Amino acid sequence: MNSPTLRIAFGTFLTECNNLGGTPTDLARFELYEYLKGEATMKAASGAARGFLTVFAERGARPVPLLAASTCPGGPLTSECWSTIRDGTLDALRAAIAEGGPVDGVALSLHGSGTVEDVDDPEGELLELVRRLVGTAPIVATLDPHGNVTARMVAHADALLGWHTYPHVDTTQSGERAARLLFEVLDGTARPTMALAKVPVIVSGVCGQTDVGPFADVMNRALAMEARPVVLSTSVFLVHPYLDLPGMGGGGLVITHDDQNLANALAVELAELYWTKRFELEPPTFSPEQAISLGLDAVGGPVLLVECADCSGGGAAGDSVATLRVLLTDAPQAVSYSYVVDAAAALACLEAGEGGTVSLLVGHSLDPKFGAPLPVSGTVETCLQTGDFVYDGGAWDGIAASLGPSAVLRIAGTKARVLITTNATYDWKDEQFRAAGLDPSDAKFLVVKSPMNYRIGYPQAKATYVLDTPGATPATLRSANHRRIARPYFPLDEEIAGLAPVVSVGR
């Protein structure tokens, strides 16, 4: 069925939400990154959407653009924000059907860990509503391996395909895999039977890399299953641990060709293996004082101080100064770069201008439950009116983002520089420091706020220490304030008698 008349609808809803902290996600936050409607959605040429469009072109199919909405993670979406994105997607699909008749298929680029102030599972809701509009037409969707995959999502999609890498470097390839499977369904050569199996493991992504380690072991087992001709796709999910929703957990998702029993068995095998890796998925951590002491003994730099508890890429506010506070007391004469989201402090620096001096409070202005502001004085070295930059790789490869009005402040009496920004932004490589004119290779200490992407951004690091600091995205969930996840679950319960993976099956 290589007909140019095939019409395939596609769209994007991509963000990750945090129930433990951060700030609400509204439509303006999407507009800072990517919010495209109608034909403009064709410009959503990054990540899985890029992969969709590549395969559509190969097959001579006509793309039917819906809506592309993606943004840096944060707190739950506001109801108004979600209804605008959901209804915009559905209205575009209705209009396309009214104009040209039923679409032949749908491809969606989703994250899988969204939530709304009054909706637990927006991706599941979207898939169900799209299903009502397209009937039996195949629906495929890509998901982040941190997706909180639900039975509702499985029930209303023909195929869900997780990205296979963390750090995420295969988002485009995942879009291509999903689109090719969609065409196999349309060609009649694939009849997807899908199963999801989960176990109650709630861990951070610090040990979730897919090149080596416990999560890589599970991912490699999954990929080996794809060597069977009857297996169409396999995925493994860590789950985003900073959600607080019923039924959360990690495990495996397997799609076979017309063999539900095999899909069930293989998904359970992956979930059981994931359970055996639970202790290895808990990372060793250091206090800032310990890490800085060890880092001072390391030869050269940069030494990475990974303050992942304040990861904007996981939905935290990005306003912590916990590590900066210790650097100023324990290593004031070591060159250090850190960053913090604090719009008022950034504005004060811009008003002083380059070369001006300021005394101000910085940090913990957005999510104050995790710490107190830090009084500092210093000289403004750099002023940025917009702080524009472009992502180099990953899910947002080529997407423009903005730090907003920002400044680099050198703290008086020290060699510490702090980048103070207005907007929280996703950490991929070192784009934020570079946008401010800071070369990370010049620093002895770098405070970075990503639990994993520093592996991509700072290959020159001489040492790396994951810190145990307060925040909405902690390295371990042992002390997290979850309220809606039912016990038992790891790590609060290390052994669970009679544990059996929970299985959800597809259409």
Image: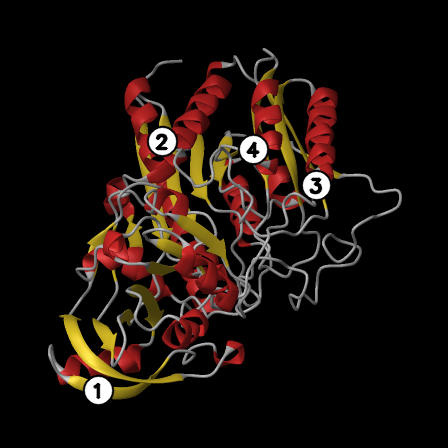
The CA distance from mark 3 to mark 1 is: 52 Å
Q: Which residue is mark 3?
A: 198
Q: Amino acid at mark 2?
A: Phe
- Please rate how many residues cluster around mark 3, counting C-alpha atoms within 10 Å: few if below 14, some from 14 to 19, many from 20: many
The quadrant of the picture occupied by the N terminus is top left
Q: Which residue is mark 4?
A: 216
- Please rate how many residues cluster around mark 4, counting C-alpha atoms within 10 Å: few if below 14, some from 14 to 19, many from 20: some
The CA distance from mark 4 to mark 3 is: 17 Å
Residue 104 in view of the camera: no
Q: Amino acid at mark 1?
A: Val
Q: Amino acid at mark 3?
A: Lys
The quadrant of the picture occupied by the C terminus is top right
The CA distance from mark 4 to mark 2 is: 26 Å
- Please rate how many residues cluster around mark 1, counting C-alpha atoms within 10 Å: few if below 14, some from 14 to 19, many from 20: many
Does residue 402 appear left or right of residue 196 in this picture? left
Secondary structure found at label 3: strand
Nearest to the eye among marks 4 and 3: give it: 4
Q: Residue at x 65, y 59 (%)?
A: 245
Decide: is 82 above or below 226: below
**Which numbered disc flags the more N-terminal residue, 4 or 2?**
2
Question: In the rendering, which numbered label is found on residue 358?
Answer: 1
- Residue at the outermost bottom position: 359
The CA distance from mark 3 to mark 2 is: 28 Å
